[in-house]
Image: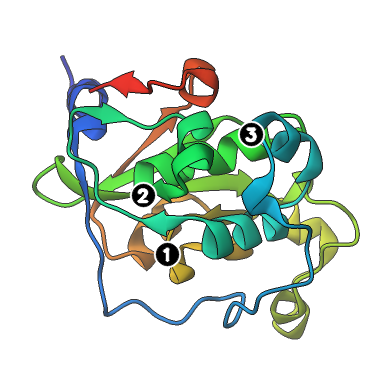
Amino acid sequence: MNLKKSLVALALTTALSASCFFSLSLSPNLSGQHEKNNHPDYSHMSYKKLIKEIKTPEQVTDYLLDCIEYEPSDFSFVRSFRRVNREHKADCIEASISAGALLSDDGYDLKYLWMFNDNPENGRAVYFYVGNAISDHLKNPKLKQEGFSDQDKSKLYGTLGIFQEDNNLPRFSDLREISDFFYFQNYIPMKIDEFMIDDFFGAIR
């Protein structure tokens, strides 16, 4: 088995039993400081209504930062999005799953990025998406200032997650750049299965 296949196999068996690593040395959020917007009261919506209501990464950021509290998991299970929305708590993997669930009916892929250094059980997860799935009205002034055209932006990646700095509008050229931004050496994209959205009891780790 080559190194890439070994890493994939290792990540598949350990990511769901891992802890989220939080680095205080990260740069400020590329989207700027989060301010509570005048969005609907997401906290009282059912998970199915939220999936229909939320259409953009910006709205996902509002939901995760305004409605969900970070809570490290006890490693016995992964909360599904249904359960996250019920308890209003999530770790970094569960928040990534929730972000994918919220955008699952809007043309976005069901994947998140697991990043780690030497120990694959100690890492961090963010949901990632390609810029060309963003609604036309969602613009990033920072990209315009730096000379990125709309066509260029369609090739860039954005990220979403439980922490303030996890939420970045599209500006990363590839997954390696995302991993470097969060100061991790290794990364593996992980698939979000449908049962991770709907199963209230969550996935057994």
Residue at 66% across, 35% down:
46
Distance of label 2 from label 3 (alpha carbons): 18 Å
- Measured along the vertical axis of the image, is residue 10 above or below residue 128? above
Examine the rendering and report whether any part of residue 173 can be seen. no
* Side of 119 where 152 appears, left or right: right
According to the picture, the residue beneath numbered tag 3 turns out to be 47
User: Which residue is farthest left?
Assistant: 118
- Measured along the vertical axis of the image, is residue 3 above or below residue 121? above
Examine the rendering and report whether any part of residue 92 can be seen. yes
Element class at badge 1: loop
Element class at badge 2: helix
Q: Quadrant of residue 49?
A: top right
According to the picture, the residue beneath numbered tag 1 turns out to be 163
Q: Quadrant of residue 136?
A: bottom right
Residue at 27% across, 80% down:
25
**Image mark for residue 107:** none
According to the picture, the residue beneath numbered tag 2 turns out to be 92
Residue at 40% across, 52% down:
176
List x then y, in percent, for residue 16.
26, 30
List x then y, in percent, for residue 115.
29, 48
- Measured along the vertical axis of the image, is residue 25 above or below residue 189? below
Towards the viewer: 201 or 29: 201
Q: Quadrant of residue 198?
A: top right
